[in-house]
Amino acid sequence: MQMKANFIISAEKLSQCPEFNLPEFPLLGRSNVGKSSFINALANNKKLAKTSNTPGKTRLINFFNFADTFMVADLPGYGYAKVSKETQARWQKHLEEYLLNRKQIKSLIQFIDARHDIQKNDYAMREWVEAYKLPIFTVVTKIDYVSKNKHAAIISNIKQNFSGEVLPFSAQDRRYCESMIEYLTDLCK
């Protein structure tokens, strides 16, 4: 199963976001955690969202329409970017405004890399989200890079630390794409 998806627009702030009434899923995560690869895997199109080995390439909120069913908003990664403190402060202000005021948001999706422990800035992001009581679930990326006998322990550890659903994902072999699309579609109902 795959969904046809297309890039709509990039926006720096809330006032520039597209006027759509589709449920929206903003992607939160550290730089290079696999947000763009997630979009590409769901769409089965490796060139839809730009991926990079250099952290901090996403600088704007990038909107993708999935078959007029839902929108995915790829946000700049947190935790690493070679930009000035002023630029980081501006990003933070614009992203907070977007996350707190965008009416279309159905749920935030926080990405955690299966190969690493949950990082300080992952915890900080989750605390911020929970302080505002925003809906959120977790996607564990790059699960295919970890031996299968460690999958359950990794997911269990994240469930102990973060509330809500915790779902595995592999952009490499697209193993969980179908269940992810079903999960997102169900949330839209």
Image (spheres, rainbow, N blue to C red):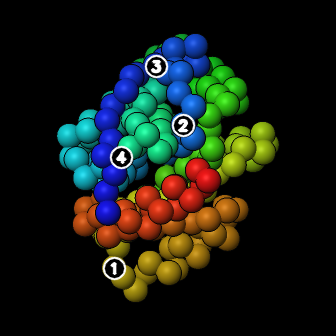
Q: Amino acid at mark 1?
A: Ser
| Residues at circles 1 and 4 in contact by the CB criterion of under 8 Å | no
Dot 4 corresponds to which residue?
A: 39
**Pointer 1: what residue?**
147
Looking at the rendered image, the disc whose residue lies closer to the viewer, 1 or 4, is: 4
Say which mark, if any, is on residue 11: 3
SS for tag 1? Answer: loop
- Contact (Cβ within 8 Å) of mark 1 with mark 3: no
Name the mark nearer the viewer: 1 or 2.
2
The amino acid type, in three-letter code, at marker 4 is Ile
Instruction: Read off the residue under disc 2.
Output: 22
Within the image, what quadrant is residue 36 found in?
top left
The picture places residue 110, in percent across and down from the top left corner, at 55, 50
Q: Amino acid at mark 2?
A: Leu
Q: Position of residue 91 (x, y in %)?
A: 54, 21
- Seen at 38% across and 65% down, the residue is 178
Q: Nearer the viewer, mark 2 or mark 4?
A: 2
- In the rendered view, would you say 145 is above or below 60? below
94 vs 151: above or below = above
Residue 109: give its label: none
Closer to us: 20 or 83: 20
> Which callout, 3 or 2, points at the residue further toward the start of the chain?
3
Q: Earlier in the sequence, mark 2 or mark 4?
A: 2
Residue type indicated by callout 3: Ala
**Secondary structure beneath disc 4?**
helix
